Image: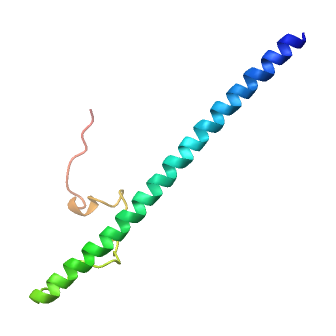
Amino acid sequence: MKAKRQQARESHLECHHKLQAGIQEVEDTIQEQHLIIEALIEEKASLLQTIQGLQEDNGAPAPFDDEWEEEPEEDPEEEGLEDIPVGEGEIVDE
């Protein structure tokens, strides 16, 4: 009985260590991805400044800025209803 308990304990510890190693690997990957994202954001800001500087040098208006204006989404049920005149059309039974 003691041998089975010892074997179960060792098996449990092995699984625990493997799980901890997997968790650490995922955390490291997330940290690397976070650093890459931060670098990309900095690169984007730098590129936007370069573009803006070139446009100012050429007297062109800026095509975009950091503040996006999102258009309100149309109600899918209302979409296309304006195309059908009231009182016209046929009802087709299939």
Q: Quadrant of the C terminus?
A: top left
Tell me which colouring the rendered structure shows.
rainbow
Quarter location, residue 50: bottom left
Q: Position of residue 41 (x, y in %)?
A: 37, 67
| 93 lies left or right of 5 | left
Q: Name the residue located 80 percent from the left edge and 22 percent from the top edge.
A: 9
Q: Name the residue located 21 percent from the left edge and 82 percent from the top edge.
A: 52
The one of 53 and 5 positioned closer to us in this rendering:
5
| 34 lies left or right of 52 | right
Q: Position of residue 21 (x, y in %)?
A: 61, 37
Quarter location, residue 7: top right
Count all numbered tags in the image, as a single digit.
Answer: 0
Camera sees residue 81:
yes
The one of 48 and 11 positioned closer to us in this rendering:
11
Q: Position of residue 67 (x, y in %)?
A: 35, 78
| 26 lies left or right of 86 | right
